[in-house]
Image (cartoon, helix red, strand yellow):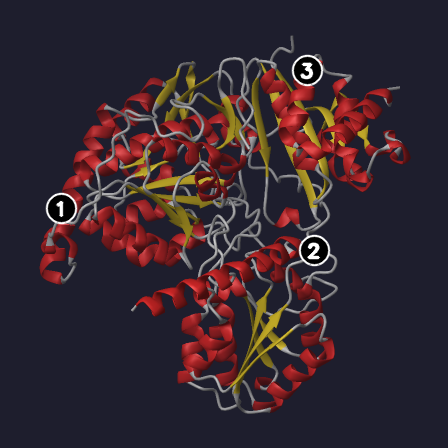
């Protein structure tokens, strides 16, 4: 059981699937019975600029935005963004960068966000069926098989 | 798409989705508005659930369409971003006098910190200025619940109600326990059937009728204030320390609970007219009472005017930008030391292959003075293009361009071009070109409409120039060339600035050389929308053929 609030920030550039990844994360935690909040900013950030999306879950969540230096996990989908966001990590927090994934193995470059979720899932105590259900609920059926593959590739990337 | 559900049957919804669902469950008869971040998804979701909603050409028209419907006793929802309320303000300030017979809720979404806006105006000021009751939900559940009370308030006092959101309420997701299944109108929900009843003195706001109407408005507000003191919808007193109390509404309530978990918190729901005595009693119970609010010192000033001793944030620092847990912690600690600037990320830019790139490159090569407007293309102001010299509000490109033409010395005036997007032109550019045709500058003028076939900036919404309605249904297509000719602009043409690059540049050069009025439609689809537009255009041909057949059949029968 995850007590209090767990803070996960997804960061990337517009078009890298950052917000989608945070939607799946929030969905998987919500299906698992946690209080969940998620914050993001739309608009100008969609035009190829820096994008980040916060997911907070646990027994109680107040602000949807993660306080300074409080990220338990930082999931960065575009390595150029590591320098921009790594200051948000708590001292014992975990940085998951996209370089952890072997892009050549992925069914498509677009599936990187799902692979990163696979990697993240190895750190979180959430039932696997809730991850699978969240992935299916947030993507079109034609992507389900490729996503299942990408998620496994991410899980296997845990060192 | 249905949202994710937890084991308790709650839904994880954004504030915008929660408002759409609530509106659906309340049997709202008509939703209308103009797309604007962060409000856009309300009507999109409402439509997706089976509600009837439509995009208006601008917010003023939306407010007026809704007013007509509310005069006929319908329950109506109007949505817009904060700057849209400026456009609708003329309607706002007098519809509070006339009142309404149906339920009328106007949702306005502020953007503290300007994530995607040209200013961070605080719409709470409109509540006082126009005399309109206001609710401020703190999260998705609060939005779902308070919308119902907002409609009840509107119907009980026959007055329009303002529902004020901010970016973080609109776009944050949090759990909602719905009162009915997704998208369904509950069987027990009975809304009055629209009907017209004449009441000239309440709806014709000429001075003789408006004078008593103003008095009626003030009486209604006085009654609503008394009701808010006793019923206090959405008000929540979260018990805590006697030494620190926090008064807040909206998202600030949640920031405050993280920033000072020990504090007593008074969460407000209806913030105009304020439940002053409830607030006074709360403030008296704690030794230090802090108002936490974004942007203007609106609440703090109201409470100070009532003689309630509260600490306000330092506006030299905290008036700017949105608040978060850390800034609220600093406000409570009265820490006015310099803030660390957030790390600079990558700024947004025009998409690769965006047709605006070609258009602005040509204008730059011609050394134009570019009066710009609101949309994705505002990004052309940034390097390397740096091809926009001014941008203020929707439609201003044309007026500002004309102003420059009227006063600049001839050699500079000849370089001025007004550049405006398709949706923006239909929103607020029409009166601009009427002025152009009426008060013609000596050097003429050149207007370029960037027709990319969608409202790209806010996420590809339809508009009257696309010939498709909110949910994609085909309808009449408003044509820019016909408008321009109808107004009396002599030189009108449509050119693809990507496929006919040289022709486009030459056309602008020729137009600049003449002392005449020219309107060029630079037509090339948004790269993000091109496949959707192409598919829709193919279907449209079939639809148009059907329409012609129907007309012929009707003609034959006569």
Q: In this view of the protein, can residue B453 be seen by the observer?
A: yes
Task: Name which of mark 1 and mark 2 comes first in the sequence.
Answer: 1
Which of the two residues, B372 or A112, is positioned nearer the viewer here?
A112
> Label 2: how many residues lie within 10 Å, few (<14), some (14-19) or many (20+)?
many
- Say if labels 3 and 1 share a chain: no
Single out the residue that lies furthest toward the front.
B557
Q: In the rendering, at what x and y percent does residue B7 appear?
A: 54, 13
Residue shown at 67%/78% (left/top)? B504
Where does the C terminus of chain A fall, quadrant-wise? top right
Q: CA distance from mark 3 to mark 2?
A: 39 Å
In what element is the residue under mark 3?
A: helix
B53 vs A77, left or right, is left
Closer to us: B247 or B336: B247
Looking at the image, residue B400 lies above or below residue B36: below
Whether labels 3 and 2 belong to a single chain: the reply is no
What chain does mark 2 sit on?
B
Distance between mark 1 and mark 2 Cα atoms: 51 Å
In the picture of the structure, the residue carrying the numbered disc 3 is A129
Name the side, left or right, on which B200 lies relative to B242: left
**Residue at figure coordinates x 57%, y 49% from the top left:** B459
How much space separates mark 3 and mark 1, taking CA atoms?
Answer: 59 Å
> Which is in the foreground here, disc 1 or disc 2?
2
Q: Callout 3: 10 Å neighbours few (<14), some, many (20+)?
A: few
**What count of labels does the image hold?**
3
In x, y percent, where is residue B55? 43, 53
Residue denoted by label 2: B349
Q: Nearer the viewer, mark 3 or mark 2?
A: 3
Disc number for residue B216? 1
């Amino acid at each position: 059981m995850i007590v209090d609030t767990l803070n996960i920030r997804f960061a990337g550039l517009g078009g890298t699937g950052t917000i989608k990844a945070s939607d799946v994360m929030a969905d998987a935690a919500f299906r698992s019975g946690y209080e969940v909040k998620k914050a993001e900013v739309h608009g100008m950030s969609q035009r190829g600029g820096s994008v980040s999306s916060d997911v907070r879950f646990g027994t109680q969540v107040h602000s949807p935005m993660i306080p300074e230096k409080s990220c338990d996990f930082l999931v960065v989908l575009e390595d150029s963004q590591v320098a921009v966001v790594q200051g948000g990590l708590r001292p014992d927090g975990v940085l998951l960068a996209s370089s952890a994934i072997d892009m050549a193995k992925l069914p498509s470059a677009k599936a990187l966000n799902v692979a990163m979720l696979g990697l993240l899932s190895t750190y979180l105590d959430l039932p696997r069926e809730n991850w699978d259900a969240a992935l299916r609920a947030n993507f079109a059926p034609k992507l389900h098989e490729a996503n299942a593959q990408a998620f496994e590739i991410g899980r296997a990337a845990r060192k | 798409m249905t949202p994710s559900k937890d084991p308790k049957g709650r839904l994880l919804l954004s504030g915008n989705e929660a408002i759409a669902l609530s509106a659906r469950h309340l049997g709202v008869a008509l939703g209308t508005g103009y797309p604007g971040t962060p409000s856009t998804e309300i009507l999109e979701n409402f439509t997706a659930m089976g509600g009837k909603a439509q995009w208006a050409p601008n917010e003023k028209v939306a407010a007026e369409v809704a007013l007509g419907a509310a005069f006929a006793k319908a329950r109506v929802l109007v949505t817009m971003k904060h700057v849209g309320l400026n456009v609708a303000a003329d309607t706002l300030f007098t519809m509070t006098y006339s009142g309404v017979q149906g339920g009328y809720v106007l949702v306005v979404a502020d953007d503290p910190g300007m994530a995607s806006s040209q200013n961070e105006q605080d719409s709470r000021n409109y509540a006082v200025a126009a005399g309109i009751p206001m609710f401020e939900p703190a999260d998705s559940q609060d939005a779902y619940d308070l919308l119902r009370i907002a409609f009840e308030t509107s119907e009980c006092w026959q007055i329009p109600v303002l529902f004020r959101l901010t970016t973080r309420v609109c776009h944050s997701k949090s759990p909602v326990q719905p009162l009915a299944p997704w998208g369904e109108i509950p069987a027990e929900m009975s809304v009055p059937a629209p009907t017209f009843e004449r009441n000239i003195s309440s709806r014709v706001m000429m001075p003789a009728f408006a004078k008593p109407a103003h008095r009626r408005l003030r009486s209604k507000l006085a009654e609503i204030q008394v009701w808010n003191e006793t019923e206090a919808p959405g008000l929540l007193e979260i018990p805590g320390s006697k030494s620190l109390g926090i008064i807040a509404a909206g998202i600030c309530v949640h920031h405050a609970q993280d920033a000072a978990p020990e504090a007593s918190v008074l969460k407000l729901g209806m913030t105009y007219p304020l439940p002053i005595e409830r607030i006074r009693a709360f403030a008296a119970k704690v030794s230090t009472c802090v108002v936490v609010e974004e942007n203007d010192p609106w609440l703090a000033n109201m409470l100070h005017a009532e003689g309630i001793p509260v600490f306000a944030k330092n506006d030299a620092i905290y008036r700017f930008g949105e608040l978060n847990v850390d800034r609220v912690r600093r406000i409570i600690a009265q820490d006015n030391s310099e803030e660390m600037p957030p790390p600079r990320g990558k700024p947004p830019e025009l998409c690769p292959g965006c047709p605006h790139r070609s258009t602005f490159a040509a204008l730059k090569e011609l050394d134009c003075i570019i009066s710009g407007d609101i949309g994705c293309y505002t990004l052309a102001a940034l390097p390397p293009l740096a091809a926009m010299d001014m941008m203020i509000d929707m439609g201003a490109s044309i007026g500002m361009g004309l102003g420059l033409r009227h006063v600049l010395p001839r050699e500079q005036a000849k370089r001025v071009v007004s550049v405006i997007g398709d949706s923006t032109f239909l929103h607020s550019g029409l009166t601009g070109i009427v002025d152009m045709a009426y008060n013609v500058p000596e050097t003429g003028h050149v207007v370029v409409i960037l027709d990319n076939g969608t409202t790209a900036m806010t996420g590809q919404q339809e508009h009257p120039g696309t010939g498709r309605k909110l949910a994609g249904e085909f309808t009449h297509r408003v044509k820019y060339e016909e408008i321009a000719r109808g107004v009396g602009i002599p030189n009108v043409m449509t050119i693809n600035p990507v496929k006919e690059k040289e022709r486009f540049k030459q056309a602008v050069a020729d137009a600049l050389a003449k002392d005449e009025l020219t309107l060029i439609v630079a037509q090339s689809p948004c790269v993000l929308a091109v496949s959707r537009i192409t598919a829709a255009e193919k279907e449209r041909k079939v639809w148009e053929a059907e329409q012609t057949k129907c007309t012929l059949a009707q003609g034959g029968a006569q």
